[in-house]
Image (cartoon, helix red, strand yellow):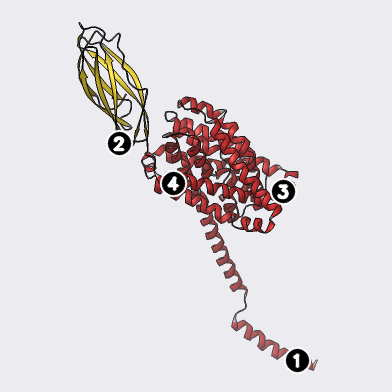
Amino acid sequence: MTGATYIIGFLLLRGVAAWTVDIVHDITVHMNHVISVPFSIPKYDSSSELSKIVITTEDNDIAIPSFQLEQNETSFNGILNVTGVFLGRTKLIFTLEENRGGESSQEVSRIIVVREERTIDTVFTASVAILVSILYINFGCAMDWNVCRDTLKRPVGPAIGFCCQFLIMPLLSFLIGYLLFSDRPELHIGMFFTGISPSGGASNIWTVLLDGNLNLSITMTTICTIAAFGMMPFWIFTLGRYIFAQGDLTVPYRQIGIFVIGLVIPLVIGFVIQRKLPRVSKILVRIMKPFSIILIIFIIIFAITTNLYLFKLFSWKIIIAGMGLPWLGFTFGLIVAKICRQSQADIRAIAIETGIQNTGVAIFLLRFTLKPPADDLTTVIPVCTAIMTPIPLTVLYIIKLIYQYRMQKAGSKVKLETVPSLEKLQQTTEISTITQPNESNL
């Protein structure tokens, strides 16, 4: 138990064996605010011995208690002032100590520190919901069912991508969360929700930049997007239930159902536009990639600027988690694709598709389904993941550009060496002019 100890006063109680505290079970306070909560401790015997009460919180970095106390004939009545320090949950503990050395402690309440609701938070959540819906309309327009059908006739690549995305990544995220955040269920949930999200739209862009198989990448993105409607709830209601139970949180069945339906509807709208309004569909498909980049950048920048407190949560564990999930995803995708003897272009596409998660969907799902402060605490994981994901890809792209530049430079040198010099050309011309008359004489 950590935190400062606050001595309330000297009380006349019968002993530590029989005493109770009348106080609300859940105390919710805004960060950087103070809330006053009444409490009382009934007297059981007027001939009691001299004792004192100590109030602590389980974590003083989350909340700090202070007090005021009065006494009457039947009870000791007090006002508990709780100061919200930072987001999170902690327990309020009353401890009764006797002069003779007896002691008894009770966890009497749960303190929940949340952020004060701001207009900009509502704007952020609503804008993310709108942008994700538009992106899924674009997905519906971009689905080339003929390409999907042709690819699925020999579905080795998509099958590898599906297994990596919805078997390896969820288990990997659960394991990373278990190893790093076993004592922080909210962060474990954030890690897990990031791992069960479908592949991100940016995977297609990176596949092009790193010379991967774009058709395979688009097919895998399409399949993973559709499969996510079933696979995300599956993982949430299986392994996810364990994490929710560890954190004493309720699985948000209703919100997850609404979330899935909310993504299916724009996907269907996009498909209808593709069939009925082909010109509009082509325009939407054309803007899909830049729109995906804008969405990712928007979510990251907006999430950071509106939630600067998130950087207080950044620790070496969170940074390792943010790096570990995508980077290990790239590695496992590469290894599995190599074992299955795929072409180099397919290996790149599968590895990139596996490692890049749709963090926008993860953030939206977390903020929509969880209540404060869990929604805020969990957001730090997908934000960190989104920041760390492009690092190895950017390094590889720079290496590729340097290699291409050196190859072009070497190629131009070879060309210059093979071009005849001016002197040789002159000598050749002189020889030809000398030999021509001789040939005519012959």
Residue 339 visible, this angle: no
The secondary element bearing badge 2 is classed as loop
The secondary element bearing badge 3 is classed as helix
Q: Which of 278 and 79 is in front in this view?
A: 79
Most extreme residue toward the right is: 442
**Quadrant hosting residue 351:** top right
Disc 3 residue crowd, few under 14, some 14–19, many 20+, Cα 10 Å: few
Q: Earlier in the sequence, mark 4 or mark 1?
A: 4
As measured in the structure, the alpha-carbon distance from the residue carrying label 1 to the one carrying label 2 is 108 Å
| Label 1 sits on residue | 438
Q: Which of 75 and 56 is in front in this view?
A: 75
Judged by depth in the image, the label closer to the viewer, 3 or 1, is 3
Judged by depth in the image, the label closer to the viewer, 2 or 4, is 2
Q: Mark 1: which amino acid?
A: Asn
Q: Where is residue 363 in the image (x, y as percent from the top left)?
A: 49, 41
Query: Would you say 103 lies left or right of 25 here?
Result: left
As measured in the structure, the alpha-carbon distance from the residue carrying label 4 to the one carrying label 3 is 35 Å
Query: Would you say 225 lies left or right of 395 here?
Result: right
Judged by depth in the image, the label closer to the viewer, 4 or 1, is 4
Number of the label disc, if any, that sits on residue 145: 3
Residue drawn 72% across the image and 89% down it: 435
Q: Which of marks 4 and 3 is nearer the N terminus?
A: 3
Residue drawn 28% across the image and 18% down it: 40
As measured in the structure, the alpha-carbon distance from the residue carrying label 3 to the one carrying label 2 is 55 Å
| Label 4 sits on residue | 303
Q: Mark 3: which amino acid?
A: Trp
As measured in the structure, the alpha-carbon distance from the residue carrying label 2 to the one carrying label 4 is 23 Å
Q: In which quarter of the image is the C terminus?
A: bottom right
| Label 2 sits on residue | 33
